[in-house]
Image: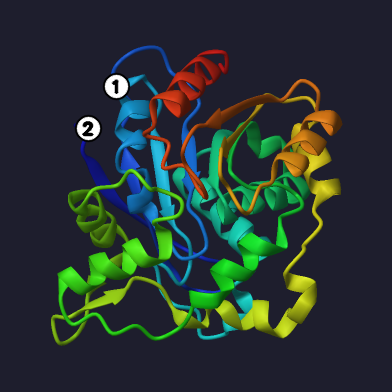
Amino acid sequence: MTAFVDRHWTSADGLHLYARDYAAAAGPAKLPVIAIHGLTRNSADFETIAPLIAQSGRRVLAVDVRGRGRSDRAPDPMTYQPAVYAKDVLELMRQSGVERAVFLGTSMGGLITMALAAIRSKAIAAAIINDVGPEVAKEGLARIASYTGQPVDTPTWKEAAAYAKRTNEAAFPHYTDADWAAFARRVFTDGPDGAPILNYDPDIMVPIRAAGTKALVPSLWPMFGRLARGRPVLLVRGETSDLLSPAIAAKMKKRAPKMDVVEVPGVGHAPMLDEPEAKAAIFPFLGEVE
């Protein structure tokens, strides 16, 4: 499996941010991929797909968005917003000498990609949007909001795995105990006393709570239109997703007829992209991007 090196960069407001940097396999130069995770997750979510993309000849930068993983937590929690995250990614690109990239965004990462299209469209050569749209289903957001930022009691890794299963088993009903143990290692880290703690700042919920009901149904259709105009876009949807409904996905396809769409069977929000159906769509899509 392709290894990664640690990459650090500094945000415009002085935060020290982190990304996993997977070097491209030898071959003709291709645009890199910037992978952006979901609300409570981090770069570890791409630990399976990123090495495969790197082996296909593309460098992959899998970021820890501010407040997650190994990136600094923000002193001002109101900066936990997609437009700020997008500007952080642009700083990563500037400091890494990357002018254009293919963006791979899961859930919140897809929203950040849409925000990037509004801020600096030319930075995006193509986009893979994983289980999110410019409009999202209230049910899915309400479910995520019900546990995000809440304290958890996980004194051991066994309890951490049980928490991961409890909050995600509807999306991955086929997962085994070993899968949940691995999942926990992605979303938890060792706390000061050695007990597992969730690997994100609970204050990421502050802007969402401040926005109230407006936060539950964001509408980013103009940004999606900008993203889908004149560049390849692939939409990945989990068959049982409660965040990206079939109706919203169909509306996206109607607005962007050239967009490719793949549905991952038996999976909810959000596919991990290691599923055969996801890989069978992602690699041909990347193969068409120079």
Compared with residue 159, is residue 9 higher up or lower down, i.e. above or below?
Answer: above
Q: Quadrant of residue 277?
A: top left
117 relative position to 4: left or right: right
Residue 236, position in %: x, y?
57, 34
135 relative position to 265: left or right: right
Secondary structure, mark 2, is: loop
Amino acid type assigned to the residue bearing label 1 in the image: Ala
Which residue in the structure is indicated by mark 2? 2
Residue 186, position in %: x, y?
29, 58
Q: Which quarter of the rendered picture does the N terminus lie within?
A: top left
Residue at the spot x=51%, y=83% of the render?
203
Residue 266, position in %: x, y?
46, 37
Residue at the spot x=26%, y=55% of the render?
180
162 relative position to 108: left or right: left
Amino acid type assigned to the residue bearing label 2 in the image: Thr
Q: Earlier in the sequence, mark 1 or mark 2?
A: 2
Query: Is residue 13 visible in the rendered structure shown here?
Result: yes
> In this view of the protein, which residue sits in the foreground, 258 or 216?
216
> In this view of the protein, which residue sits in the foreground, 29 or 82?
82
Compared with residue 14, is residue 45 higher up or lower down, i.e. above or below?
Answer: above
Q: Which quarter of the rendered picture does the C terminus lie within?
A: top right
Query: Is residue 69 visible in the rendered structure shown here?
Result: no
Q: Residues within 10 Å of mark 2 (few under 14, many from 20)?
A: some
Mark 1 vs mark 2, foreground winner is 2
Which residue in the structure is indicated by mark 1? 25
Residue at the spot x=78%, y=25% of the render?
230
The reply to whether callout 1 and callout 2 are in contact (CB within 8 Å) is: yes
